[in-house]
Amino acid sequence: MDLNLERNGRVLTVQIAGELDLSTSPAFRERIEAELGQNQEIQHLILDFKETSFIDSSGLGAILGRYKSMAQRNGKVSAVNVPPHLQRLFELSGLLKVMAIYPSLEEAQN
Amino acid sequence: MKENYLKISFPSLPENVSLARVIVAAFAAQLDFTLNELEEIRVATSEAVSNCVIHAYREKSGEIQMELQIEDGALSIKVIDEGCGIQDLDLAKTPAYSTDPERMGLGLVFMESFMDKMTIESQPNQGTRVLMIKKPERSKDNNGDQP
């Protein structure tokens, strides 16, 4: 898994390339938490799944963990470029109750 | 229909979860599964093997056995560990049951949802055997089987 983090003011966008599972979710958690820790003004975490090939419940748990971090600072989490097979997992897991999906990065930012 | 089997064992390392997914997906591709069904098989395999790493052996290293079989047009996946076993199977199957805030407790739910059949045999301190079976929907249509 490769992560590309880009901060623009109060918005942190994270592009997730590859697989988010038991092996890679600790790095996902640590990278994002480090960025959030250094930038207390971040209020909106946008996760970009365009290059994400696989997620299981370990990966979904890591996303839920970041939602909890953002909720603690009264922020929010959004998802963009979600392929159909991931959308189904998001629906089954209940993540969509706390994470909005937008068709594009621009719409999530607005 | 050609029958086939594969038996492998590997240490309970997080890095081997993706390896298990790749092996099962390549084996399953011998049947007429759709891409969506193969994705479901990959998720179910990932959950079963991850459970061995996270719960069965915890911080210790142990061995995971995986037995794959194609028989009567169906794929069966056995995932076997000799770890701590499951104390309360009904509780473990409860959606969103997890003791870890970074986990959703959905592993067994996904395994049951994505496979046609899933059974678990487990005894405390004697390990766990998971059996998952799935048949391609397209072959069910052809021979009149009910999904």
Image (tube, rainbow, N blue to C red):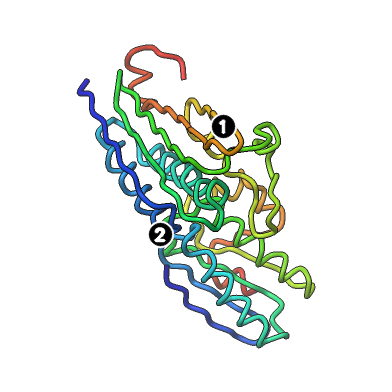
Q: Is residue B66 left or right of residue A70?
A: left
Which of the 4 image quadrants contains residue A54?
bottom left
Q: Residue furthest left?
A: B2
The N terminus of chain B sits in image quarter: top left
Q: Amino acid at mark 2?
A: Glu
Identified at 45% across, 58% down, the residue is B14
Q: As rendered, which of B17 and B10 lies closer to the eye?
A: B10
Q: Residue furthest top?
A: B144
Name the residue carrying label 2: B15
Identified at 65% across, 51% down, the residue is B104
Q: As rendered, which of B42 and A82 lies closer to the eye?
A: B42
Q: Is residue A33 left or right of residue A24?
A: right
Q: Amino acid at mark 1?
A: Ser
Mark positioned earlier in the residue sequence (2 or 1): 2
Q: Which mark is residue B122?
A: 1
Give coordinates of residue B98: x percent, y percent: 69, 49
Identified at 55% across, 64% down, the residue is A80
Chain at numbered mark 1? B
Chain at numbered mark 2? B
Q: Is residue A28 above or below residue B109?
A: below
